[in-house]
Amino acid sequence: MTASSPIVLALIPARGGSKRIPGKNIRLLGSLPLIAHTIRCARAAGCFSRILVSTDDPTIAEVARVHGGNVPWLRSALNATDASTTIDTILEVIDHMEANGAPMPDALMLLQPTSPFRSVENIHRAVALYRETNGESVVSVSPATSHPWWCKRIADNGELLPFLSGIDDGLRSQDLPPAYTLNGSIYLCGITNLRARRSLYSAHTRALVIDSPEEALDIDTPFDWLIAEAICRSREETSP
């Protein structure tokens, strides 16, 4: 990696067989299949050496290609089960590229299709932060909608208890330190770090704060899908 221009690969993981939302990755969200929103955003960013889609499903692969995604091979069955991890999928892509003599990037940005409203601006912010911190991982987060200070747990006897120890219920919301949650939109990590640590986190991972609730939406349930559809309708109604 050079200080001014890291070579970044965009990887869009899209396994088939979604249980909660059948056919999720190619289901129409607005006028486009879900995966197409992420492919188009990555292409519009113009900062990636390649935009690869990792999928085990030939139908997803074909839809991805139609919308500009690069699917040079299908994911192995080993990394296409419910027990497969994101890291295993990423390392399979890196190993496959290396074995086939493809130019190796400095870093990989994971762009999950379940975050269809991420912006080009935040992709650029992530790359800039990666460069400024000399290759520390960058992970997108959003302000927590429910502060952990107010979270509770239920004891075996049914008693309601603070989830965190030492809680002072007398504090006001505005007196609490800011809390953030992972939103799944952007993960950017160096290739060397991915292999050495088997993690998207580096020694001093940096936070990319995304304040927009729309951008932070991670579609995981049918209810999330309804929210995404409402956002699409609102955008279509307000677009010129």
Image: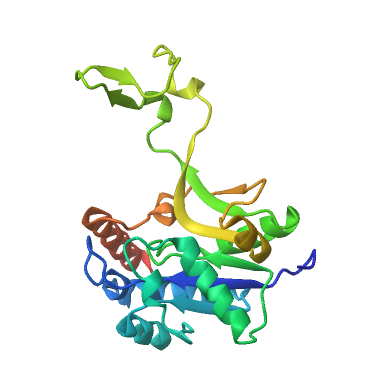
Residue at the spot 68% in from the left edge and 57% down from the top edge: 130
Residue 124, given in percent of the width and then of the height, sits at: 62, 63
Residue at the spot 26% in from the left edge and 19% down from the top edge: 160
**Residue furthest to the right:** 3
Residue at the spot 23% in from the left edge and 53% down from the top edge: 223
* Location of the N terminus (image quadrant): bottom right
Left or right? Give the position of 38 relative to 129: left
Q: Quadrant of residue 63?
A: bottom left
Residue nearest the viewer, comparing 199 with 132: 199
Please determine whether, in this image, residue 78 is positioned above or below residue 187.
below
Residue nearest the viewer, comparing 165 with 63: 165
Residue 220, given in percent of the width and then of the height, sits at: 30, 56
Residue 50, given in percent of the width and then of the height, sits at: 58, 80
* Location of the C terminus (image quadrant): bottom left
Left or right? Give the position of 57 relative to 157: right
Please determine whether, in this image, residue 38 is positioned above or below residue 193.
below
Please determine whether, in this image, residue 35 is positioned above or below residue 187.
below
